[in-house]
Image (cartoon, rainbow, N blue to C red):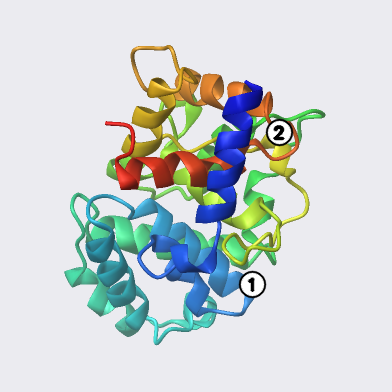
């Protein structure tokens, strides 16, 4: 484990850099400065992160162009007329029904809270990430007219999902370092609680390195990976997402 830690630490230093940003969905929230704009754009970018990264970035750019690139102001002050462009929005299985519900949820939430972090703050005494994500799922679908078809776009452990996109979004919001990639906006959730996103690249490399032994990729797999990463850094295990993803992109471990 000591040799693996040294190897991965070097790769974290290599890939956890601003040069990583332009071709990644995190480039979308990086266009904004207002905390709520970063939360909204980061969440949508993460939830739309299916397929080629160039396409994801283009579709997110289109989505926020409909909001005049001022998403928080749009969420709180839009008219019904302002919503019409979203009737044409599609990205893979994400359709206008989903887009309009996302907007409805954000409006409802930000009318009550200053930050999206509050949607993950459970009443539990000692919450873990599983309880936080399940709590968010129920909070997100609190509106009485929520469309059940939109469930597919909000992963949760209660549905045994690996929650790749949600864990990626939380990494962006929670991790704090001086590398200029993750934002570290939130303070009520610790980086030690984060779960490593299991995308195809990370999953493949982690199995090659013996960090995953489960045959399937689900919530338990994400937990297994993160617990192994905690042996190398218990306070910030998800920093190794950069190393595993970078190895996968370079295809150094086929």
Can residue 139 be seen here? The reply is no
On screen, residue 97 versus residue 113, left or right, reads left
On the image, numbered disc 2 is attached to which residue? 233
Quarter of the image for the N terminus: give it.
top right
Determine which quarter of the picture holds residue 16: bottom right
| Position of residue 71 measured from the top left corner of the image (x, y, whole percent) | 48, 77
Q: Is residue 3 visible?
A: yes
Q: How many marks?
A: 2
Residue depicted at 68% across the width and 59% down the height: 184
Q: In the structure shown, which secondary structural element does the residue marked by tag 2 occupy?
A: loop
- Estimate the x, y position of residue 97 in percent, counting from the top left: 26, 57
Which residue extends farthest top?
Answer: 214
Residue under the image location 79 percent in, 28 percent down? 126
Mark 2 crowd level (few <14, some 14–19, many ≥20, 10 Å Cα): some
Crowd band around label 1 with a 10 angstrom C-alpha radius: few (<14), some (14–19), many (20+): some
Would you place residue 137 above or below residue 212 in this image?
Answer: below
Which quadrant of the figure contains the C terminus? top left
Q: Which residue is mark 1?
A: 35
Secondary structure category for the residue under label 1: helix
What residue lies at 37% left-to-right and 76% top-to-bottom? 64
Q: Is residue 10 above or below residue 84?
A: above
**Which of the two discs, 2 and 1, sits closer to the camera?**
2
In this view, 121 is above or below 232: below
Label drawn at residue 57: none
What is the distance, in whole Å, between disc 2 and disc 1 at their CAs? Answer: 28 Å
Name which quarter of the figure residue 83 lies in: bottom left
Depth check: 243 or 169 in front?
Answer: 243
In the displayed orientation, state which residue is furthest to the bottom.
68
Seen from the viewer's position, the closer of residues 106 and 39 is 39
Expressed as whole percent of the image width and height from the top left, the position of residue 80 reads 34, 79
- Mark positioned earlier in the residue sequence (2 or 1): 1
């Amino acid at each position: 484990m000591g040799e693996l830690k040294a190897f991965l630490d070097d790769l974290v230093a290599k890939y956890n850099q601003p040069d990583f940003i332009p071709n990644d969905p995190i480039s979308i929230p990086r266009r904004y400065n207002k905390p709520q704009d970063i939360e909204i754009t980061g969440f949508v970018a993460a939830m739309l992160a299916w397929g080629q990264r160039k396409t994801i970035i283009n579709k997110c750019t289109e989505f926020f162009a409909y909001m005049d690139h001022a998403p928080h102001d749009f969420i709180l002050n839009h008219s019904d007329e302002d919503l019409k462009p979203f009737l044409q929005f599609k990205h893979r299985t994400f359709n206008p029904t989903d887009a309009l519900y996302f907007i409805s949820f954000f409006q409802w939430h930000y009318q009550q809270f200053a930050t999206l972090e509050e949607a993950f703050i459970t009443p539990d005494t000692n919450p873990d990430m599983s309880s936080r994500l399940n709590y968010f799922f129920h909070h997100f679908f609190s509106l009485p007219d929520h469309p059940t078809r939109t469930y597919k776009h909000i992963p949760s452990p209660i549905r045994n999902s690996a929650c790749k996109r949600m864990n990626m979004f939380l990494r962006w919001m929670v991790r704090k370092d001086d590398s200029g990639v993750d934002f570290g906006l939130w303070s009520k959730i610790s980086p030690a609680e984060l779960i490593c996103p299991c995308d195809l690249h990370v999953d493949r490399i982690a199995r090659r390195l013996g960090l995953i032994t489960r045959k399937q990729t689900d919530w338990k797999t994400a937990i297994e990976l993160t617990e192994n990463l905690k042996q190398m850094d218990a306070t910030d295990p998800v920093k190794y997402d950069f190393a595993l993803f970078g190895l996968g992109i370079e295809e150094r471990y086929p």
